[in-house]
């Protein structure tokens, strides 16, 4: 017989989270990921309670094409941090789970040793959610992890499409992992992503690849001269590292710590977080409006017929959309 999980109050959740209870953290994240509005309402009540205890972490976004070594890097980097006694949470944004129904990231057992580390918490992205949904959930998970006491939050995304921008919009520091010897096009790195990075790290700088990695470092560092100055007010560096051999990771952490210190001094750290809050507000409004619209009983009833009208061109799709919106507004 399945035991029914007892329904908890917002106070229960908040208390557990603030005590550093990961089970409670996981349950709260499940609430956020739930499509039931009852669960979401509960989640927002939990938020109100934990919000004063959030913000005390450094939020690091990591991106790069599949195969560049993101999960290996996070595993090694995360272990290095937990060895220092730091509490590390890893969250993933994986829009591919929407497209394929499965997840590139979830296919393999990832970050096994970090997952088993008592100082770490690894949460894969929810399967089957659209990018906007995963992104919204992830920025809320960051806050929950902070309230649970995690000091370093790593948000990982595959280097495709819109997801990097989303991650950039929820983190303090954006790290782009790259490979030596592969052209930019081959790496699928858009100029916009490089422009938004706070640090470029050329991974796999080991074995025969070391020389190539060092050369690539010089080439990228030169290329960055032509880029506009980062909104952090600090120059963007290029470094080399090896996730496999644990090389260059200490240096990367030093760069991040120095970045945090300097941007807190020049006010850009706070400014980024503030504009991210505004962004999050607007995104929530958009998502919530969409949800309310599609869940409205009269809209649901009218939708199939309207879709058909739009499909066969009986009415122009734009007019059909406006009719439905008007119907919603009148309710
Ligand atoms: P992801 O797809 O970006 O998460 O990349 P993975 O972490 O799964 O790594 C892809 C492949 O590259 C795996 O076979 C790793 O063992 C290998 N790899 C990752 N980091 C390094 C590194 O620093 N050096 C070398 N030589 N191989 C690495």
Image (cartoon, helix red, strand yellow):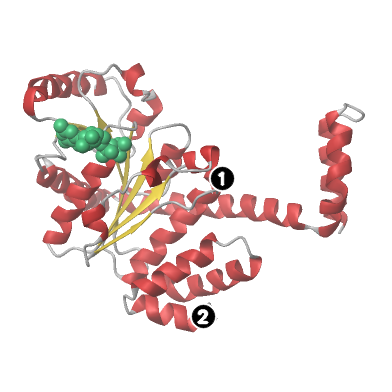
Residue in the picture at 49% in, 65% down: 30
Taking the image as shown, residue 329 lies to the left or right of residue 71, namely right
Packing grade of label 2 (10 A; few <14, some 14-19, many >=20) is: few
Label 1 residue near ligand 1, CB within 8 Å: no
Taking the image as shown, residue 251 lies to the left or right of residue 178, namely left
Residue designated by label 1: 130
Residues 192 and 179: in front is 179
Taking the image as shown, residue 87 lies to the left or right of residue 24, namely left
**Hey, which quadrant is residue 231 in on the image?**
top left
Q: Whole-Å distance between the Cαs marked 1 and 2?
A: 31 Å
**Hey, which quadrant is residue 205 in on the image?**
top left
Residue in the picture at 56% in, 45% down: 130
Please provide percent x and percent y for residue 10. 51, 79
Residues 196 and 112: in front is 112
Residue in the picture at 17% in, 55% down: 79
Label 2 residue near ligand 1, CB within 8 Å: no
Please provide percent x and percent y for residue 158. 38, 37
Of all residues shown, which one is farthest toward the front?
Answer: 1
Res 42 visible: yes
Res 200 visible: no
- Dot 1: what SS? loop
- Dot 2: what SS? loop
Residue designated by label 2: 3
Task: Write down which quadrant ligand 1 falls in.
Answer: top left
**Hey, which quadrant is residue 247 in on the image?**
top left
Packing grade of label 1 (10 A; few <14, some 14-19, many >=20) is: some
Quadrant location, the C terminus: bottom right
As drawn, 223 above or below 294: above
Please provide percent x and percent y for residue 189. 36, 25
Q: Nearer the viewer, mark 1 or mark 2?
A: 2
């Amino acid at each position: 017989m399945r035991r029914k999980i007892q329904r908890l109050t917002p106070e229960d959740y908040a208390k557990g989270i603030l005590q550093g209870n990961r089970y409670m953290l996981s349950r709260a994240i499940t609430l956020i990921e739930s499509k039931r509005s009852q669960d979401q309402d509960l989640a927002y009540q939990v938020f109100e309670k934990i919000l004063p205890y959030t913000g005390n972490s450094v939020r690091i976004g990591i991106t790069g094409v599949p195969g560049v070594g993101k999960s290996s890097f996070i595993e090694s980097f995360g272990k290095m941090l937990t060895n220092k006694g730091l509490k590390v949470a890893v969250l993933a944004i994986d829009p591919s789970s929407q497209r394929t129904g499965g997840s590139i990231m979830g296919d393999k057992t990832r970050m096994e040793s970090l997952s088993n580390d008592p100082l770490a918490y690894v949460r894969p992205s929810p399967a089957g959610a659209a990018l906007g949904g995963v992104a919204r959930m992830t920025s809320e998970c960051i806050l929950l992890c902070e309230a649970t006491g995690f000091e370093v939050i790593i948000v990982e995304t595959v280097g495709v499409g819109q997801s990097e921008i989303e991650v950039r919009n929820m983190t303090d520091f954006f790290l782009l992992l790259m490979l030596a010897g592969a052209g930019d096009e081959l790496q699928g790195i858009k100029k916009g992503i490089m422009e938004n990075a706070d640090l470029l790290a050329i991974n796999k700088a080991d074995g025969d690849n070391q020389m190539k990695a060092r050369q690539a470092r010089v080439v990228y560092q030169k290329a960055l001269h032509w880029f506009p100055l980062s909104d952090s007010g600090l120059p963007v560096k290029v470094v080399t590292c090896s996730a496999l051999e644990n090389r260059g990771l200490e240096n990367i952490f030093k760069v991040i710590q120095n970045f945090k210190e300097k941007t807190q001094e020049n006010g850009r750290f706070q400014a980024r977080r503030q504009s991210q809050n505004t962004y999050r507000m607007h995104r929530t409004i958009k998502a919530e409006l969409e949800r309310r619209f599609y869940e409205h009983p009269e809209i649901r009833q009218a939708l199939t017929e309207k879709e058909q009208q739009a499909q066969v061109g009986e009415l122009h799709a734009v007019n059909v959309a406006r009719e439905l919106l008007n119907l919603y507004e009148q309710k």
